[in-house]
Amino acid sequence: MGDAEWERLIYQLRSGDCTPFLGSGACVGTLPTGTALSREMARRWGYPYGDDHDLPRVAQFGAIKYGDAVHVKRLVCDELDAADPPDFLHPLEPHGLLAEFPLPVYLTTNYDDFIFRSLKAVGKRPNTAVCPWNKDIAYAEKLFSNEAGWNPQPDTPLIYHLHGNLQDPTSIVLAEDDYLEFLTSLAAEGVAGSQRMLPTSILAALTRRPLLFIGYSLQDWTFRVLFRGLLRAVPGINRRRHISVQLAPSLDTSKADVKDVQRQLARYYEDWRISIFWGTAEEFCMELRRRMGSMP
């Protein structure tokens, strides 16, 4: 990211013209990474294959083993719910930093409630809703039928959990079948023009404001499938210039140059109008605060 991109991002955050999109990497150090969680559940469930880092596949195995997908989801939620929340007052904690800005909508594929707690910690009154990606998840009709849902404000922001939350284990997108159903429902949403999965305020957050992805990897299949699905269902996402905070690719440096691979990935995602900050969420927060003049 160059100086102009930082200048644009800081202006957008301070003016509320930005939609944060939070993934699991925003919780590093507090919750286990997807890979660590996957390997732990694979160990417990006796997963016999070599790709034990692939959580959707491991969860699919668990659902087949126990014959009950909801039971598997509850086991995963129990594992995540046991963790203590991060220190939202720490200057490099991403949820606490984002809560400081006057942003009306926060999108997340995380199951935790950290962004809700961070907003409450700074005196805001957030509302939350879960994307009804399957027929068993209730649409938040009461919320989206009043102003708090269809016109969220910085003091009463809306948090939208695209992949469910810990409070309702049945709502989480976890196994391979869940991802397929989510994308199928999203595709049908685009064709039918329904506002069940993507209510008006969420569509506006996706199309009228640039997105700031924190906690995803461009090499992560989940991110690629999710964003491609959103692009198909909501083509207007491509109108603005987005930013994604990305970990540098994990490579065998004897066979590939990290900088060269980064340039290749950046070119690939240029069609999606995504600029990349290479680093951890903490490193991004440090650089953002430094550029805003609020880093000691």
Image (cartoon, grey):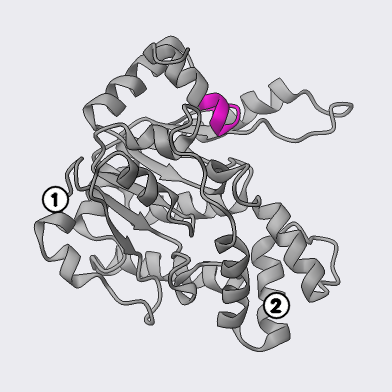
Q: Is residue 267 visible?
A: no
Do callouts 2 and 1 mark residues in contact (Cβ within 8 Å)? no
Amino acid marked by disc 2: Gly
Does residue 186 lie above or below 6 as drawn? below
Residue 134's x, y, as percent? 40, 76
Quarter location, residue 9: top left
> Is residue 110 left or right of 292 when viewed as pictured?
right
Task: Using the image as rendered, state which of residue 98 and residue 231 is in the foreground.
Answer: 98
Distance Cα–Cα, label 2 vs label 1: 40 Å
For label 2, the SS is: helix
Q: Residue at x 41, y 36 (%)?
A: 96
Q: Residue at x 35, y 71 (%)?
A: 132
* Residue at far right of view: 254
**Residue at numbered disc 1:** 151
Residue 150's x, y, as percent? 15, 56
> Is residue 36 left or right of 287 when viewed as pictured?
right
Q: Is residue 278 magenta?
A: yes
User: Which label sits on residue 50?
Assistant: none
* Residue at far bottom of view: 67
Does residue 116 lie above or below 104 as drawn? below
> Is residue 124 left or right of 273 when viewed as pictured?
left
Q: Residue at x 46, y 55 (%)?
A: 109
Is tag 2's residue or tag 1's residue first in the polypeptide sequence?
A: 2
Q: Is residue 150 magenta?
A: no
Residue 130's x, y, as percent? 35, 65
For label 1, the SS is: loop
**Residue at numbered disc 2:** 62
Q: Which residues are magenta?
A: 277-284
Label 1 neighbour load within 10 Å: few <14, some 14-19, many 20+: some
Quarter location, residue 25: top right
